[in-house]
Amino acid sequence: MTEELIWPTEAALRSVDIHEVLPQQEPFVMISRIVQLDAVRTTCETDIRPDNIFVEDGYFSASGLIENIAQTCAARIGYINKYILKKSVQIGVVGAIRKMEVFNLPKAGQQISTIVEVKEEVFGMTLASAQVLQGDQLLASTEMKIAVRQQ
């Protein structure tokens, strides 16, 4: 990705139907909207619905947080492919999760923000660091490697 690209505004991102940039479909969609995207950083918001398949005993599970992070990466790749490169949405696979720490689980009915920062992109592999926040509270952090199937 080059820095010369014109990145979308928050208003433009909020108008995107998240289903158009993700390979996942309901009931397995774990993000609600993209709110920030540039050459390095992507931020997604998620409204945790009580009927979410990863809600257990009223809390969004650690597995749900991992999938939320992976889908934030997928939304980034999907948006770039669809709206910038004019390609189809590609399927990605989590290749590795490192340094995963979960500090707290959010309750159903709450909103979380997931921030992914790309550290490196090489040969269809993306290495990213991620944080999940609820307001200013850090809920989880990790590093994730995503491999994208080339078409």
Image (cartoon, rainbow, N blue to C red):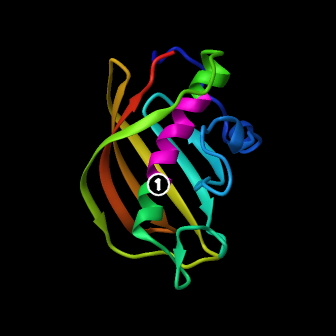
The residue at which mark 1 appears reads as: 67
Q: x and y percent of residue 13 in the render?
A: 69, 39
Residue type at the position of mark 1: Glu
Q: Nearer the viewer, residue 69 or 34?
A: 69
Against 77, is 88 above or below? above
Q: x and y percent of residue 111 in the render?
A: 60, 68
Mark 1 crowdedness (10 Å alpha carbons): few <14, some 14-19, many ≥20: some
Which residue lies most toward the left here? Answer: 99
Q: x and y percent of residue 74 in the render?
A: 51, 38
Q: Quadrant of the N terminus?
A: top left
Q: Nearer the viewer, residue 127 or 43?
A: 127
Which residue is found at the position 33% from the left and 73% from the top? 103
Q: Nearer the viewer, residue 129 or 20?
A: 20
Tell me which secondary structure the magenta stretch mostly adopts: helix
SS for tag 1?
A: helix
Against 132, is 75 above or below? above
Residue extent of the magenta highlight = 68-79
Q: x and y percent of residue 56 in the render?
A: 51, 79
